[in-house]
Image (cartoon, rainbow, N blue to C red):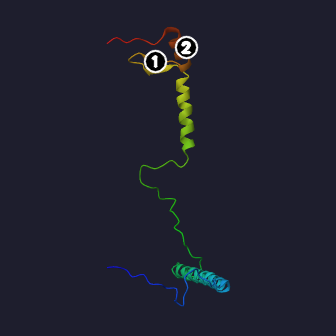
Amino acid sequence: MAHKHENHANDSVTRGHETSDVDVKSVAISGILLSAGLMVAGILFSWWVYSIFQSHTAVPEAPAITFAVPDSAKLPSEPRLQADPKVILVPFVMSQDSILASYGWVSKDSGIARIPIERAMELVVKNGLPVHSK
């Protein structure tokens, strides 16, 4: 099917770009009216939601409760996260530091004792690591 090319030079419409501009005043007024309408709709919607919450309160004159308030007396199921980890961590680190810096028995029945870590490092530097035979 062959396309027929016609000469459009005689048409009443000449080819080119749009010669008329957008009416700035109309666009500005439309934007202002749209913004005002959205603001009024938002205010009306907020008032409607507040009135629904207000009508469902135990005492109609009381302020609406819109957020869930957790029951602080009820604890979640196990395992629980620590509310303040430092309260438990600081005493634990202090007890571990005191164990690492003191002499004591690991197992008195087996004759295994512990020595301060600083002393243990001095002995390793002086004597080397112990060799275990298989």
Q: How crowded is mark 1: few (under 14 residues within 10 Å), some or many (20 or more)?
A: few
Q: How crowded is mark 2: few (under 14 residues within 10 Å), some or many (20 or more)?
A: few
Q: Residue at x 54, y 72 (%)?
A: 66
Q: Which residue is drawn at 54% across and 31% down?
A: 95
Q: Is mark 2 on a helix, strand or loop?
A: helix
Marks 2 and 1, how far apart at CA: 17 Å
Residue 49: where, in percent of width, then height?
A: 54, 80
Residue 80: where, in percent of width, then height?
A: 46, 50
Disc 2 target residue = 122
Q: Which amino acid is tagged 1?
A: Ala
Tally of numbered tags: 2
Q: Earlier in the sequence, mark 2 or mark 1?
A: 1
Instruction: For marks 2 and 1, give the one nearer the viewer.
Output: 2
Above or below: residue 112 compared with residue 25? above
Q: Quick one: quadrant of the C terminus?
A: top left
* The image quarter in which residue 1 lies: bottom left
Disc 1 target residue = 113
Q: Which amino acid is tagged 2?
A: Glu
Q: Which residue is drawn at 60% across and 83% down?
A: 34
